[in-house]
Image: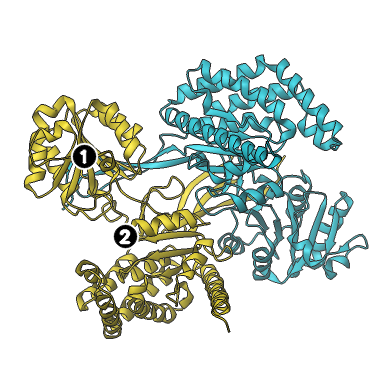
Chain colours: A yellow, B cyan
Amino acid sequence: MSEALRVIEGGREIAELMRDIGRRARRAARRLALASAAEKNAALAAMAAEVRAATPAILAANAEDVAEARAAGQTAAYLDRLALDPGRVAGIATAIESVAALPDPVGRVLASFKRPNGLVIERVATPLGVIGVIFESRPNVTADAGALCLKAGNAAILRTGSDSFRSASALREAMAKGLASAGLPADAIQLVPTRDRAAVGHMLAGLDGAIDVIVPRGGKSLVARVQSEARVPVFAHLEGVCHVYVHAAADLAMAKAIVLNAKLRRTGICGAAETLLVDRACAATHLAPLVTMLLDAGCAVRGDETVQAVDPRVEPASEEDWRTEYLDAIIAARVVDGLDAAIEHIETYGSHHTEAIVTDDAAAAVRFFDEVDSAIVLHNASTQFADGGEFGFGAEIGIATGRMHARGPVGVEQLTSFKYRVRGSGQTRP
Amino acid sequence: MSEALRVIEGGREIAELMRDIGRRARRAARRLALASAAEKNAALAAMAAEVRAATPAILAANAEDVAEARAAGQTAAYLDRLALDPGRVAGIATAIESVAALPDPVGRVLASFKRPNGLVIERVATPLGVIGVIFESRPNVTADAGALCLKAGNAAILRTGSDSFRSASALREAMAKGLASAGLPADAIQLVPTRDRAAVGHMLAGLDGAIDVIVPRGGKSLVARVQSEARVPVFAHLEGVCHVYVHAAADLAMAKAIVLNAKLRRTGICGAAETLLVDRACAATHLAPLVTMLLDAGCAVRGDETVQAVDPRVEPASEEDWRTEYLDAIIAARVVDGLDAAIEHIETYGSHHTEAIVTDDAAAAVRFFDEVDSAIVLHNASTQFADGGEFGFGAEIGIATGRMHARGPVGVEQLTSFKYRVRGSGQTRP
């Protein structure tokens, strides 16, 4: 057989494999939609127990993944994200249990109204259906995403990065045992059983309508590919170019605490601040202390001319800096002429993720809340609160900046759809 | 210039025209998002007044459309949908006023919770942004869709069928005058100013991200094209193959009233019943009266063998009949072996739109509600209640069968998105 023919054959095989995964997920989803909260929670408990019991197998598989990634020359930071140890496996099991402890999002009555003709109409939360999750090489996502999808009554099709394929397979095997022992279909959580990249393309095309939504978990290039190619809805954010705006009426001590936390608590998360806007009206008193604080804390500052004048360590900011998600100890800083200019900057350069205003002026906060078109807007609080756990959602599968269905942290409630239930006593329409 | 080059030139012009429409809609949307309920309602009132004042111009434009369509050999039913008269124009103006009378959907607090650290988090309804509406030759959709989008703070890009282009243009001109007189941008409601079909393709591609959602209003071929080509979310239903299931414990008189109404009140709407399922357990008493009633009322019945045995007027049903949306005085009918078989039939052949069960058995109704995966499920009521007005939404832009964001009747509330507003007092994340 020629090489070209072999490729086509391989493509056909992958296509059929993926279609089959889609069909099995659809069947499992129909069963899950009828599972009670107790059934789902029993399955999650069993999954956690099976993960604990499989710790040696999971660690052995992970050691192979790590060895291969090290041989391929991956960085220490990358290997650290990939590596599991007994404590991390225990943490994965505990995380599954904490999902079980969340309130069941299915069956919630979202609205209820009685019509003059006596019809009682309820809007009731239902599972979304089948969720495709495409992620990179963090093995724990296998368990987190699978557990969250299950809790909301959805089937999950998980596609892991190649480097964590063995770890994810071992984790999924334990989870499948837990599902089966609790009487739920093992197909409720499937892992794409090939490293072939063509599988991702099939998922983005929706597997003949089997996938209802795709959730990418990973870096900007993965999310960008998913957003541009997906033929089904996507819950994601491309980047978090988050702003802290220190308004004219900001308390300096509060501004310092919030800016420091928003930028430096953890620099690698999407809710980390990337741009500091300081109002010209308070620049004389607030700018230098804020900039000096950041520089002294080890943060590089790239500023406009006014900011550069504060300290020789400040580097000049380019136009590109205002659009950059550093995910590092770097911040872009500029002085703005009032609230309108701050909002204009955020709308021009921002990513509609998370923005904060620091001010004692309630009216300014209201305008910021109204006019900034971001998933999360905060008043006198750090942007690093952009997180499902911090919102009380228990856990999140990601943060979305789209405007449809899910926006902000995506927890189990956001993984549901709804239907209308109408109760009558023989009503016909006039 | 060669013909090929001219086509390319024309394509470029349309692309640039459409991009410009998208940019203007985006700008208008930003202004509308900040418009108060009073501003929007004043604009709607002014739009209604301008439509009334422009009645002669609207009727003149419509007369040209009708003459052209008649010359092109369109059917009487088609011409009737297209034609306006003074009463219909007055009805259009009244419909705009009734949208003004609806509660404002923007700014509703959808959820509110306080975190242990004192943060107060609110989920607040915001406009969706820019809505593209693609419709056929019913001139009133220009006003209905424009008014609903505006009420929810969205900019609308309307694309009408060629046959009502002049009527829609005259209506939109009056509405734009109303918008401007109320101080809102006329670009809040734009009409694609060309009959060139390439414009639809550009809208489906999203106009460089300017369009947030597409709503097709029209027949199955339009909706199918939009669903298969759109690169942005779509609110729509492809068809309504709606079922009435007469359960073993159904009251016969109630079943007769509901079946008659569900099928024949209006046969051309998406909530009209297309398939009757009668439980074998009550077939001996219920089947003949139901089938005879339908036949006597002028409805053709296509049935399985048991149904055919009831009356010689019953024609045999083919496999295709179970999947068919007749939108006419025709019904497919079959006897099913209990609730499970009824649900299985609906899940196999249905369109996930609207289904009803008639029964006095509450437990059967609960199982039907849980297991039928449709946007609307009814107990002891006619499927023809599948309508935004009947749900109390005031008006609807359509009915959706997708699982994301909007499902069932799409009224002004469904044309909103949301954001999280977080109020703190200096909180930083530990």
Name the residue type under label 2.
Ala
Name the residue type under label 1.
Ala
Residue A423 visible in image:
no
> Few, some or many C-alpha atoms within 10 Å of disc 2 (few <14, some 14-19, many ≥20)?
many
Residue A388 visible in image:
yes
How far across and how far down the image is residue B182, in percent? 50, 17
Left/right placement of residue A195 relative to residue B22 reads: left
Q: Same subunit under labels 1 and 2?
A: yes
How far across and how far down the image is residue A415, in percent? 43, 58
Q: Which of marks 1 and 2 is in front?
A: 1
Left/right placement of residue A386 relative to residue A419 reads: left
- Compare residues A256 and A326 and report the one nearer the observer: A326
Left/right placement of residue B86 relative to residue A152 reads: right
How far across and how far down the image is residue A366, in percent? 29, 30
The residue at 31%/79% (across/down) is A51
Which disc is residue A395 wearing? 2
Which disc is residue A302 wearing? none
